[in-house]
Image: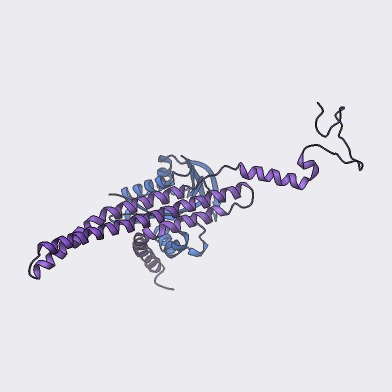
Chain colours: A blue, B purple
Amino acid sequence: MSVTVLYISPEEWVKYAEDSHAAVFKEFRPSSIDRISYALAATDESGVIGYVTCRETDSESLYWQHGGAVDTRYGVAAYRGFEAFLDNAKPYKRVTTLVRNDNIKYLHLLMKFGFRVIGLRCVKNEIFLELTIEF
Amino acid sequence: MATPGLDANGKPLLDANGNPIMTGLIGDMDPKLAAYQNADQQMVGAKTVSSPWANMGTNQQAADQASSLANTGGIQAGALSQAESNMSMRGGLGGGAASRMGRASADNAAMARQDINRQGASDSLGAQMTGADMTSANDQANAGITQGVQAFNTQGNIKNLGGSNAYKIAKFGTDIKGFGAGQSANALAASGGKK
């Protein structure tokens, strides 16, 4: 099973943003509020795995805004998709992301790959952990 | 030896109006010019950083080009085989016709490879040019003019990649739409089917 990572421009991502967000987060989020540098999508022979939206905060730092795997691809495929996204981020010096504090599986995955908690945010009565990894 | 602009006692030399003279420093003569000189030095000495995306763009393009070149020979061989087969059905493939067809096929393959290489050179140049844009943008950011140019140039890089990925991205869009539509249906069902 080989994972293919697709690079999608912000202009093109507008077409897929709402469907992608609904598929992963099970909620509607209008594409018009996105301000991203680009999006990455992961696919393999069996179809779509997941996506992540990225924003360059400077030439060395990347912020992962939204993303995840579709629920039918949880497990090995999601793991390899995440691995592929992280490989694609390695030209930068660091990646930062926010994860809700009850998303235990994703927190485990991030920390297994070397992400470390560096902060905490409260947004609309929800708590998010800020994690970063330095390459 | 006395410092330029100072007398033997270390006090500034003054002109008839009481202003310092002959200091040898541009700033003392024209503070505005000194500010310019300082800014100019900062811009010249600024460290330039190319975006990781410039490199990604080049790598992706090289892979696509190699893949296209690898396929060219097979496509032409298939076309030649098909032509020979058609000739056989029309009453036989003579030696002269086979030779001409073989030469035409080789010419076509060569032309196709040339086109791919030319397009590849163009795409590669595109990726590197946006790298140069990024370097220029960093100079501007270091000079304190703007910091918003990074994202803009990243978008330029992505545009160069867009063409080669267009089919795969469209397929991703179709696939993910299925998941999104399912979620909408589920949400509607969960709400009792009411609007």
Query: Is residue A38 shown left or right of residue B94?
Result: right
Residue B20 versus residue A51: which sits nearer the camera? B20
Residue A30 position, x and y percent, is: 48, 64
Residue B116 versus residue A68: which sits nearer the camera? B116
Query: Is residue A38 shown left or right of residue B27?
Result: left
Residue B61 versus residue A103: which sits nearer the camera? B61
User: Which residue is most to the bottom?
Assistant: B195
User: Which residue is most to the top?
Assistant: B1
Q: Residue at x 64, y 49 (%)?
A: B144
- Image quadrant holding the C terminus of chain B, namely bottom left
Please count the marks in the image: 0
Is any atom of residue B149 visible in this view?
A: yes
Query: Is residue B5 shown left or right of residue B119?
Result: right
Q: Residue at x 43, y 47 (%)?
A: B55
Is any atom of residue A70 visible in this view?
A: no
Residue B42 lies in quadrant: top right
Residue B48 lies in quadrant: top right
User: Which residue is most to the right?
Assistant: B16
Residue A105 versus residue B152: which sits nearer the camera? B152
Residue A73 position, x and y percent, is: 32, 54
Residue B136 position, x and y percent, is: 56, 50
Residue A89 position, x and y percent, is: 44, 46
Query: Is residue A58 shown left or right of residue B71?
Result: right
Q: Residue at x 41, y 59 (%)?
A: B162
User: Which residue is most to the front?
Assistant: B96
Q: Residue at x 61, y 46 (%)?
A: B142
- Image quadrant holding the N terminus of chain B, namely top right
